[in-house]
Amino acid sequence: MHFGIKNPHHIAALLLAMFAAAPSFPEPAPPATVPVLMISDIHFEPFWDPGKAAQLAAAPASSWTAILASTPSPDREAQFNAIQQACHSRGADTSYPLYASSLDEIKTNVTGAIFVTVSGDLISHSFTCKFEKVFPNAKPDDYRAFVERTIEFVIGSLRTTTQIAATTSLTRTVTFSVTPARF
């Protein structure tokens, strides 16, 4: 088929004109993003100040912040090191001062998150051994109550800090979310 165009420059100009005149389509919108906060492996250490453990065991989780934020016991470090050694614990889990600092950073720097996912462990390593060293005459129900209060304190402080309701599950992951209507 012959269209009367013999010069290759004319063909190129014609093609260029065809593409220039073609309808333009808007750029697709970027995918929507959802601001979230992901937290993993808190390993909160309620035994960091063993001198406060009896107060914690006797108090509801809602009172723990006041107890933990009070002046450390004079022999805190020696007592904690003895427990760590007796339980063959390596490294350090999250003390209250570190946890409180983390919560302050979340409150300051994480705004607009519509849900929070907490994966991993909430309580310290060697928790059972440490509990037994601090409370040698405790009953199994005492242990269970202390574990539950520790988890309640961690989840409650995250709820308070993020102002997002929590939904918990039986897995090792805890998810905080808002009602679906917010999406």
Image (tube, rainbow, N blue to C red):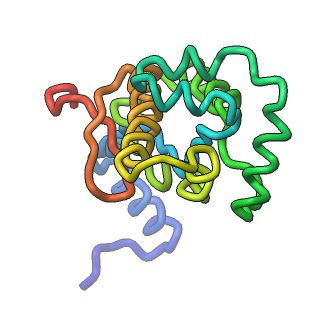
Q: Residue at x 64, y 40 (%)?
A: 47
| Residue 35 seen anywhere in this rendered image of the structure | no
Q: Which residue is drawn at 69% across and 61% down?
A: 87
Q: Say which of 170 and 77 sits in front.
A: 77
Residue 41 coordinates in the image, percent (x, y): 55, 51
Residue 172 coordinates in the image, percent (x, y): 38, 57
Residue 95 coordinates in the image, percent (x, y): 68, 36
With respect to residue 62, does 81 lie above or below?
A: below
With respect to residue 88, does 97 lie above or below?
A: above
- Residue reaching furthest to the left: 181
Q: Say which of 160 and 18 sits in front.
A: 160
Q: Quadrant of the C terminus?
A: top left
Q: Which residue is drawn at 28% across and 81% down?
A: 2
Which picture quadrant has residue 55? Answer: top right
Q: Quadrant of the N terminus?
A: bottom left
Residue 151 coordinates in the image, percent (x, y): 42, 40
With respect to residue 82, does 145 lie above or below?
A: above
Q: Say which of 103 and 55 sits in front.
A: 55
Q: Residue at x 34, y 56 (%)?
A: 18
Which picture quadrant has residue 163? Answer: top left
Q: How many labels were placed on the picture? A: 0
With respect to residue 81, does 16 lie above or below?
A: below
Q: Say which of 116 and 2 sits in front.
A: 116
- Residue reaching furthest to the front: 137
| Residue 56 seen anywhere in this rendered image of the structure | yes
